[in-house]
Amino acid sequence: MRNFFKALIVIFAASVYSCNLHSTSSNSDTKTFVLSDTMLKSTTFAKVSLEPLKNELEFYGKITADNNKLIEIFPVVGGSVTKVYVELGDYVKKGQLLATIRSTEVAGFEKELNDAKSDVVVARNNLKTVQELYEGKLNTEREVITAKSQLEKSESQLNRMQETYKIYSLKANAVYEVRSPLSGFILQKVINEGMLLRNDRTNNIFDVAQIDEVWAIANISEADIQLIDLGFDAQVTTFSYQGKVFNGKIDKIFNIIDPETKSMQVRIKLNNPDFLLKPEMKASVRISNTLKEKMLSVPSCAVIFDKSRNFVITYKDRFNMETRKVEVFRQVGDVTYISSGLKEGENVITHNQLLIFDALND
């Protein structure tokens, strides 16, 4: 019996020694992750700061020409289109010839012009004759005054016809010239050679617009109308230029609801010096404004999304880094607002954070 208890003591002692040995071995294998000199050089940091809260909403819309720089061109006479010199989308200069129309109406104007010229010649000759007779005392001063009055009327009629020709670009041989009233692009063309235009035509034949400045028209849903106001910043992107942002501000709110889209429209003016933006392009409009409320914020690149949760890596020094779970309130572009999990002034890692996250959480 005594030998049996001695055997149990020996077995227990061996077991305790083995456990202690295993524990010592495990502790010696535990290592703390430390940033190497090479990784530290390429790692970037940012401080958690208290910033004004920004609100951001995204809407869809389209690009349109500035209505103040768009002119619809109507033919002032009817007739047969003899020549069209431009195509849809062409850039034209002010005064450039767009088309010519041969017209019976112009023929009538031409006759009136020739008659006015003849009347002036007759009136001048008559005045000269009357003045000579008056000097020879063969008629009265009244007749001279009447002749002068007739000459003035004839000259006035001639000036009127000449101005008509100038304003409407009328030419000899019953030709009417359609010229561009401004420099810009042909946005609409509904005229072709050989077309017969009626005298009572009410539709325009050309639209010409300057597009060095354009409008982005965004459709605002009824639920979001209260969140929009004049002067709010707007970032406009298009499907044609992915990644390129055109910046502007809301400068007009159309305070009516479109019965078809059930939305209200707002306008953003955009500079377009290289004519990249074309009328009727589809656009995405991101509208943002800054609130008085402040909240802790970090660069969006510092936030790591893993297993349906958000984390950041806080940094004190190369030996002290921590995976911190955070609650994201809102992300606005490059800034993410944090509602809990961080304190103002703490440092977070913004580059190499994924590598460090993996190393800390292996």
Image (cartoon, rainbow, N blue to C red):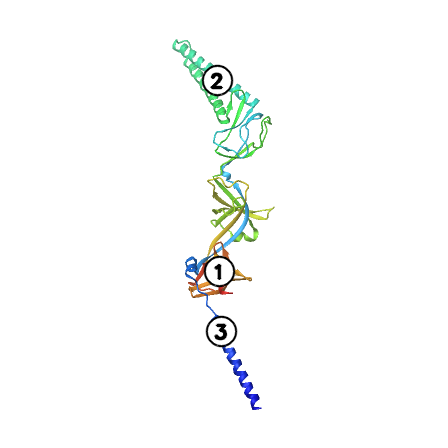
Residue bearing mark 2: 117
Measure the C-alpha gap from mark 1 to mark 2. Answer: 92 Å
Residue bearing mark 1: 355
Residue at 49% across / 62% down in the picture?
357
Q: Quadrant of the N terminus?
A: bottom right
Specify the amino acid type for callout 1: Leu
Image location of residue 337, percent across then percent down: 48, 59
Residue 219 is left or right of residue 134, and the answer is right
Return the disc, 1 or 2, that comes first in the chain's sequence.
2
Residue 129 vs 165, above or below: the answer is above
Q: Which mark is residue 25?
A: 3
Q: Which residue lies furthest to the front in this view?
A: 3
Image location of residue 281, percent across then percent down: 54, 42
Q: Which of marks 3 and 2 is in front?
A: 3
Q: Which residue lies furthest to the bottom in this view?
A: 1
Q: Are marks 1 and 2 in contact (CB under 8 Å)?
A: no
